[in-house]
Image: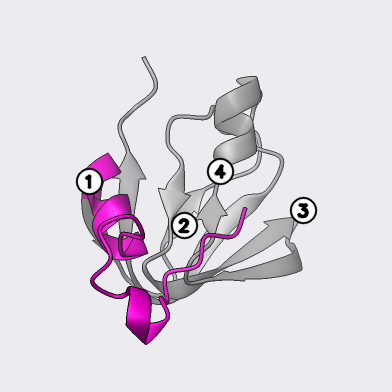
Amino acid sequence: MRITGELQPELANDPVQPNFNDFAKALGSVVNFSAGQVLFRELDPPRFVYFILKGSVELSIHGRVIATINEGDAVGLLSLIDDQPRTVSAAILILAFWPIYREKS
């Protein structure tokens, strides 16, 4: 899932086209993570979806890196939707600020 946070200058103050960061912050709490921290591991139960406001995260399966996710992307959405265990591990590469959807009830 890719959500673009950069708006064209002429749309920056358009109330119909809100800034992604403001929108994402309204969804949940903004949490500061440091490089090297693990968001979740393979087979963890799904509890949150993370929207990347700044920084990047590395996704891996069985210790092998399969993707790098950057600003404007969401991490963990599919597992939250289908209520299945995580299929990848996610670790912070660069200092990041993330809004987090409220815990699934």
The reply to whether the C-beta atoms of the residues labelled 1 and 3 are less than 8 Å apart is no
Residue 95 image position (x, y, % from top left): 35, 77
Does residue 33 appear to the left or right of 88 in the view shown?
left
Residue 26 got which mark?
1
In the image, is residue 46 above or below residue 91?
A: above
First reached walking from the N terminus: tag 3 or tag 4: 3
The reply to whether the C-beta atoms of the residues labelled 4 and 2 are less than 8 Å apart is no
Identity, as a three-letter code, of the amino acid under mark 3: His
Q: Nearer the viewer, mark 1 or mark 2?
A: 1
First reached walking from the N terminus: tag 1 or tag 3: 1
Question: Which residue in the protein does label 3 denote?
Answer: 62
Question: Which residue in the protein does label 2 denote?
Answer: 38
Identity, as a three-letter code, of the amino acid under mark 4: Gly
> Along the line of sight, which residue is nearer the eye, 100 or 23?
23
Question: Which residue in the protein does label 4 denote?
Answer: 76
Query: Distance from label 4 to label 2 (Cα)?
Result: 13 Å
Does residue 105 appear to the left or right of 46 in the view shown?
left
Identity, as a three-letter code, of the amino acid under mark 2: Val
Q: Residue at x 36, y 62 (%)?
A: 20
- Circle 1: element type: helix
Is residue 93 something one can see in this rendering? no
Q: Residue at x 59, y 26 (%)?
A: 81
Residue 5 image position (x, y, % from top left): 42, 70
First reached walking from the N terminus: tag 2 or tag 3: 2
Query: Distance from label 1 to label 3 (Cα)?
Result: 34 Å
Residue 8 within the magenta-colored segment of the rendering:
yes
Query: Distance from label 2 to label 3 (Cα)?
Result: 14 Å
Residue 34 image position (x, y, % from top left): 32, 71
Quarter of the figure with residue 80: top right
Query: Distance from label 3 to label 4 (Cα)?
Result: 17 Å
Magenta stretch, residue numbers: 1-29
